[in-house]
Amino acid sequence: MTLTDTASAPASVRESDKIMNVLVPAGDRPTRAGALSASWTYGWRALLKIKHVPEQLFDVTIFPIMMTVMFTYIFGGAIAGSVDGYVQWLIPGVFVQTLLMITMYTGLTLNKDISKGVFDRFRSLPTWRPAQLVGALLGDQVRYSLAGVIILCVGFVMGFRPDGGIIGVLAAFALLLIFSFSVSWIWTVVSLSVRSEQAAMGVSMFLLMPLTFASNIFVDPTTMPRGLQAVVDVNPVSVVVTSVRDLMSGTFDLGGVLAVLLYCAVLIAIFGPLSMFIYNRKS
């Protein structure tokens, strides 16, 4: 604040500045956190919540195992003729489905924090405003990674053998984490738009169920009616599953990978600013 600004400022403002200068001298004041630093800090907060409430890891531990084993042994014989044959098709699909289902809980956690008034305190802090949302999504990447590792371990035990080896698996994993981060912005918009955690759950399931089941996760789309095939082919989840299957099988389809990255860019470009618009209006 310049001398002119100080002179024209209200007496209460000038007095508060004097008190601040006495309590915290200018040379001792910490620098304002940048965008990256603030995002990492809020991400670390998300991890600490897992430490203090480990029960929330249920969805990334028990749920993946249950989904993989149940679908393989219940539908394997009917769809592929044998469990061994179906595992090779199913594991990449369930790998994608599980991580997408878990992204929904990002919005639920965010809605719970907002309803408790936690984010009202965050808004008063002199940090990059989007960091509060970006950090929460970055922290959840650890949960996604844990769920993915569990799915792959269960798949290996059940006989899944990807021809692409470790390189193909890691490439597919990285691509899916990027897509999961992008999809999380959808649930951020949902959580900011509704007033309760139950409503956020209902809307999220309403959107997520058609995306996962009207896809190529469980069955080959060629067995579906032509009208449904057209829907499945343009479903972003089907595009991701196809790319993950290709990478794990040792086939690198540049067009498929670029299509997934394009979907990611579009999702972030649409739902990222929309999230911040709704978030700022709540201030």
Image: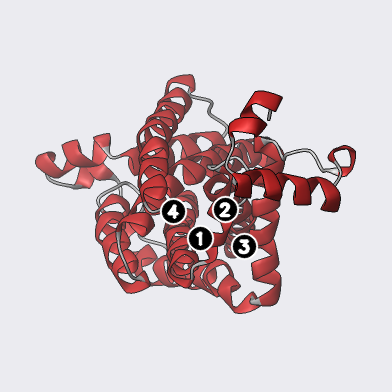
**In which quadrant of the rendered view does residue 276 lie?**
top left
| In the foreground, 168 or 59 | 59
- For label 3, the crowd category at 10 Å Cα-Cα, with few meaning under 14, some 14 to 19 and many 20 or more, is some
Above-or-below relation of 148 to 3: below
* Residue type, mark 1 in image: Asp
**In which quadrant of the rendered view does residue 183 lie?**
top left
For discs 1 and 3, the disc positioned in front in the rendered view: 1
- For label 4, the crowd category at 10 Å Cα-Cα, with few meaning under 14, some 14 to 19 and many 20 or more, is many
Q: State the SS at label 2.
A: loop
Write down the residue under mark 4.
Answer: 100
* Residue type, mark 3 in image: Ile
> Measured from the top left, where is residue 200 in percent x and y?
33, 64
Q: State the SS at label 1.
A: helix
Write down the residue under mark 2.
Answer: 124
> Measured from the top left, where is residue 64 in percent x and y?
52, 66
| In the foreground, 43 or 151 | 43
